[in-house]
Image (cartoon, rainbow, N blue to C red):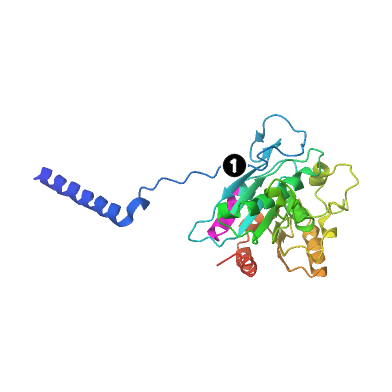
Amino acid sequence: MKQQIFSNWQMRVCAWVAALIFTSGATVFAEPQPAPQPQLLWPKGAPDSNGLKGPETVRACIGNISIPTLTVYRAPEKKATGAAVVVIPGGGYGVVCVDGEGKAIAEILNERGITTVVLKYRLPNHHYLIPANDARRAIRMTRAKATDWGIDPKRVGVWGFSAGGHLASTVATVFDSGDAKSDDAIERMSSRPDFAILFYPVISMDEEITHKGSRRNLIGDEDLVERYSSELQVTAETPPCFLLHCTDDRTVNIENSLRFYQALVANKVPAACVIFEQGGHGPNAFNKNPSWEGVFDGWLKKRGCLK
């Protein structure tokens, strides 16, 4: 009798499993999708060098970067809006923090149907042109790969954090339409982002408000304060911008965002600036202030980035 009860139980389980397989199909046993793999930003080698050698240092953030890469997180097909964002993590121009300000941001954007391209850029190491060269190349490559990556080349933005925000503001204010005569199809693309998102960004090299580590690592003693103070580079051609900063940020003075926002308004550039009382510097600035998402979504919708 006991054996018969066990046998009936087995039969019920088998029937349940079979039903689940036929009703749910491959979804039940689907293999996890492989993680996106980094790809070379300059497949044939960069045209310039930052002079760094040896392996990268990989801890919470990555240092000693001499070979820049892109990691593409495609938006789910059913959600994809056709928009793309090049994400530039921070790190004071001394490291690049690709997890909390890279991969985590891809999850935020993918959920909204936006393909994300995380840039691991070369560190300046006293070669101040290097990071912006990589950032502009990332924007050009995203446009050049539009068909392959299923995106609209006219809806490519940039999102930077802290020193990555400075880099994003640099490419949002100083750009070009591409080299039409280049043999490299990527270099024929425009480097102007269609919109820019700046979270707790370093903007100015003015010693009164700048992040001293970023300034030291980027320009050192070079007489480049005005050139790399992005609030002084804003024009009517600067793309629409969204800024977020916290009043209690003790790492990057909120005056950086305020000056940039004022310059945007003065030049009639569409801009939004979200300021929170508390949150400090880093991902907590937005993780602890979830109300930013509603404002952000409305702004993205105006840019044609959300369905």
Q: Is residue 106 magenta?
A: yes
Q: Is residue 176 magenta?
A: no
Q: Is residue 220 above or below residue 267?
A: above
Residues packed near mark 1 inside 10 Å, few (<14), some (14 to 19) or many (20 plus): some
Q: Which residues are magenta?
A: 103-115
Identify which residue, 131 or 185, lies in the foreground: 185
**Image check: 26 left or right of 166?**
left
* Quadrant where the C terminus is found in the figure: bottom right
Q: Main secondary structure of the magenta part?
A: helix
- Furthest-top residue in this view: 54
At x 75%, y 39%, the residue is 47
Q: How many marks?
A: 1
**Image check: 23 left or right of 5?**
right
Q: Can the viewer see residue 305 in this picture? A: yes
At x 25%, y 54%, the residue is 19
Q: Is residue 177 above or below residue 61?
A: below
The spot of residue 135 in percent (x, y) is 72, 49
SS state under label 1: loop
Q: Is residue 1 above or below residue 174?
A: above
Give the image quarter of residue 229.
bottom right
